[in-house]
């Protein structure tokens, strides 16, 4: 599938719903790379009048077709959302092993939507995907 796993995760923090969906490969090839595909999906799924910090906004973690390969920059992934600074689409990228590990788990991207009532984190171990309580990880004010 030309560097794509063919699956992605949709995680709703408001409801706790976790869905695995099939990636439209033609769409992924048209908007190639994590930034292109995630920007397209965000524009399709988030209304223009949505405020950046509103639960209706989404944050998308997206890999591209070169993630996990030995190509230069083959370890970069994108994070795309509506920016609180500008109110427009914002994208950042990062490197390291995270994008490669997401791809090895079988996913090309994660769409996170909604808002949790309490601190949480997303745990992914291959086909096991869970939203876990992060209260024990709370930082304390050390002033």
Image: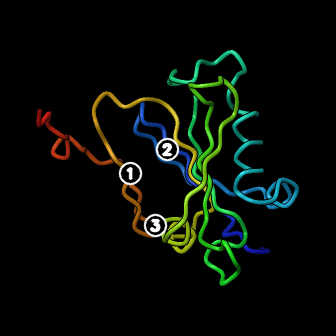
Quick one: label 3 or label 2, which is nearer the N terminus? 2
Quadrant housing residue 30: bottom right
Quadrant housing residue 134: top left
Question: Which residue has dot 1 on it?
Answer: 122
Query: Quadrant where the C terminus lies?
Result: top left
Instruction: Answer whether labels 1 and 2 touch (C-beta < 8 Å).
Output: yes
From the viewer's side, name the closer residue of 77 and 119. Answer: 77
Crowding near pointer 3: few (<14 within 10 Å), some, many (20+)?
Answer: few
Above or below: residue 4 compared with residue 47: below
Residue 10, given in percent of the width and then of the height, sits at: 55, 46
Instruction: Describe the colour scheme in one phrase.
Output: rainbow
In 3D space, how far apart are the residues under numbered discs 1 and 2 (Cα atoms)? 9 Å
User: In the visual, does 44 lie left or right of 141?
Assistant: right
Quadrant housing residue 135: top left
Instruction: Answer whether labels 3 and 2 touch (C-beta < 8 Å).
Output: no
Q: Which numbered circle lies on residue 127?
A: 3
Question: Which residue has dot 2 on it?
Answer: 11
């Amino acid at each position: 599938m030309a560097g794509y796993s063919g699956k992605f995760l949709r995680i709703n923090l408001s409801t706790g719903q976790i869905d695995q969906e099939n990636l439209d490969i033609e769409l992924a090839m048209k908007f190639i790379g994590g930034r292109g595909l995630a920007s397209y999906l965000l524009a399709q799924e988030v209304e223009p009048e949505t405020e950046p910090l509103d639960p209706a906004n989404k944050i998308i973690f997206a890999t591209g077709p070169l993630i996990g390969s030995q190509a230069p920059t083959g370890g970069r992934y994108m994070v795309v959302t509506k920016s609180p600074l500008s109110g427009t689409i914002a994208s950042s990228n990062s490197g390291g092993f995270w994008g490669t590990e997401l791809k090895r788990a079988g996913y090309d991207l994660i769409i996170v939507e909604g808002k949790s009532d309490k601190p949480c984190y997303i745990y992914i171990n291959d086909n096991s995907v869970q939203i876990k309580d992060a209260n024990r990880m709370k930082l304390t004010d050390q002033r």
